[in-house]
Each structure stands twice: as C-alpha cells, then as structure tokens.
Image (spheres, rainbow, N blue to C red):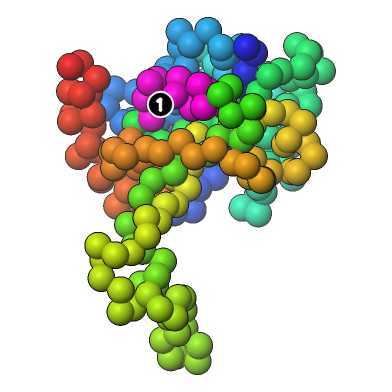
Amino acid sequence: MKIMTLIPARGGSKRLPGKNIRLLGDKPLINWSVDVCKGLDFISDVVVSTDDEVIRQIALKAGAMAPWLRPYELSTDSTSSIDVALHALTWYESVYGQVDGVMLLQPTSPFRTRDTIKRGVDLYVQNSFNPVIAISSASSHPMWCFSLDHNKLVPMAKDGLNTRSQDLPPAYVVNGSFYLATADHIKNNRSFYGENMTPLIIESPIESLDIDTDFDWLVAQACLNPFLETLSQ
C-alpha cells in the first residue's frame, strides 16, 4: 500500500491569522497532523503544500516533505482543496510514481488520532477503494434548520419542525479531518466526493474539532489536556 498524504497549509487566514503555525501545547498546529502520520507504514510520504516559507520550514523540521511553495493562483481565498491536491499529486507521481491513494488531512484537525487513520484506510481497502470521508453527528439537525426569504423564516424540511428530537433520523456533517480516494477518482471527478462514498464516523467531539475561528482555538486549548490524557491511557 502506497498512500500519499497531503496537508494543505496556506499562509493567509483572515478569520484566524497564522493559525497553521500557532502553538497548540508545545508545537505548531501543523505539526499535530504531521506527527500523527509517523510510524504508519502505508503512508509513503507526507507532503505539505503551502505558499508560506515559514510554514514550509516548520513542516520540513517536523519531518514532512515541502519541496516547493505552491503558486499564487493556488493560494487565494477562492482556491479549492481539490486544486491543491491535484497540483501536489501531479508533482508527486512525476517524481515517485503512481500511488494507491491520496489522503488529505487538514491541519486544523489536530486531535485526529492514529487509530482513526488506520480505521479509515481499513475501510478504504474493505470497500474496494471507494472514497472514505470523515463525518460527525450534526450539532444542529437540518430538519430543524431554516433559510431566510425576504426576512421570513422558511423551514429547510417541511415535516421536520414537529418531529421530536428522538424521532429524527441521524444526520451527519463532513468534519474535514480525513479524506481518502484513489488518484484516478480525484483526477476524473475533481473531487474527493462521488458515488459509493464510505463514511468514517468519528464520534468524539474532541477529535472532530475543526479550528477555524478564535472560539474554536479556545475550545482546542481547553480540550488539549483531556485529549492527551486519553492517548496515555
């Protein structure tokens, strides 16, 4: 098994400036995603794609590959993760040959565990190499959500408002911590998503945390010691 792991880490962040290199505990945020990959023999390399030289140097020191700074056109607010993934994949295969999968780990999910990564790869193999996407229970059920139409509330689901919480069907959201698909799937679909996706269900709210705002950062700091304690058990 030869899986290329990609960690996209752009330097610019308007909502949480410098988040990828902020210290969480005793190390920069990006290091958490680099370190969790160490010792996993199915990962061929961990590639950090960044437009920032400081992030690049931190990634190299952490033991990841960071062979270039990604071009400007792949470093804007409108750049998609799939464009970044395709850029890294094209380079990697041109140098190291074909891979059995591309795993994308967002650096903003620091509490993703090694066991979860192993479980995701197991699901990938067991389900004929269909895409595997990490999901968590939705904090707000979509059947109880609204849109606005000229300042009027419009239910997202007509029959949801009068349904008791215990009678609602389970609802999940993509938490951003783990994506895995074949190179061909990514190239052909320009997406990690597609038909026959396999869910990697993450039940722990700590592990599901995606840091995107100052509030998320405060939550991460509060969760750090409890998370480390679970790892030591």
The reply to whether the magenta stretch includes residue 45 is: no
The one of 68 and 90 positioned closer to us in this rendering: 90
Residue at the (66%, 45%) spot, across then down: 195
Residue at the (32%, 57%) spot, across then down: 139
- Residue 32, above or below 175: above
Q: Quadrant of the N terminus?
A: top right
Which residue position holds label 1? 116
The stretch of residues the image draws in magenta is 112-124
Give the x, y percent position of residue 186.
Answer: 72, 36
Identify the amino acid type marked 1.
Answer: Thr
The reply to whether the magenta stretch includes residue 117 is: yes
- Residue 119, above or below 20: above
The one of 188 and 90 positioned closer to us in this rendering: 188
Side of 159 relative to 58 (left or right): left
Residue 58 seen in the current view: no
Give the x, y percent position of residue 101.
Answer: 65, 23
Indicate the quadrant where residue 73 lies: top right
The one of 99 and 76 positioned closer to us in this rendering: 99
Give the x, y percent position of residue 162.
Answer: 30, 79
Residue at the (80%, 39%) spot, across then down: 188
Report the number of numbered marks: 1
Q: What element carries label 1?
A: helix
Residue at the (39%, 20%) spot, across then down: 114
Give the x, y percent position of residue 109.
Answer: 41, 36
Q: In which quarter of the image is the C terminus?
A: top left
- Residue 184, above or below 26: below
Side of 162 relative to 201 (left or right): left
The one of 227 and 17 positioned closer to us in this rendering: 227
The chief SS type of the magenta part is: helix
